[in-house]
Image (cartoon, rainbow, N blue to C red):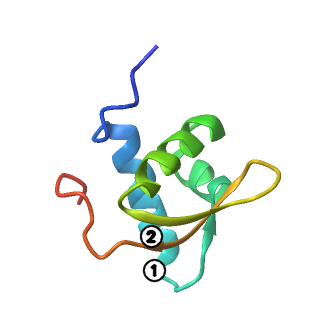
Amino acid sequence: MTNYDDGLSEETKAVYRAARQALASGASCSDEEIAEATGYDIGLVRDRLMFLASDYLDTKPRDDGSIDVLSLSTDPPQDIA
């Protein structure tokens, strides 16, 4: 199994990019939308969103375990373009 905790894995970058694209319209986006956009498993997307939420995303967990992304931080990770 691949280790997704390095913070700069391709999966992390793809999840961040998908969130950024979804938020470009000014609305929030869901983890389901990001999973659909990236093609990744919802569990992986949620894991990466929680990692990114520590510094780079404003998220809101829902009671059912899903996650909404509300906004991006002003300083994105340097290695994520």
Looking at the image, do the residues carrying marks 1 and 2 touch, with CB atoms under 8 Å apart?
yes
Q: Dividing the picture into quarters, in which one does residue 47 lie?
A: top right
How far apart are the alpha carbons under marks 1 and 2? 5 Å
Residue at x 45%, y 80% (from the top left corner): 24
Vertical placement of 73 versus 13: above or below? below
The x and y percentages for residue 25 are 52, 84
Assign a secondary structure to mark 2: helix
Give the side of residue 78 with respect to residue 61, left or right. Answer: left
Residue type, numbered disc 2: Gln
Assign a secondary structure to mark 1: loop
Residue at x 59%, y 82% (from the top left corner): 27
Vertical placement of 56 versus 4: above or below? below
Q: Dividing the picture into quarters, in which one does residue 67 lie?
A: bottom right
The x and y percentages for residue 29 are 61, 69
What residue is disc 1 on?
Answer: 24
Mark 2 surroundings within 10 Å by alpha-carbon count, few (fewer than 14), some (14 through 19), many (20 or more) = some
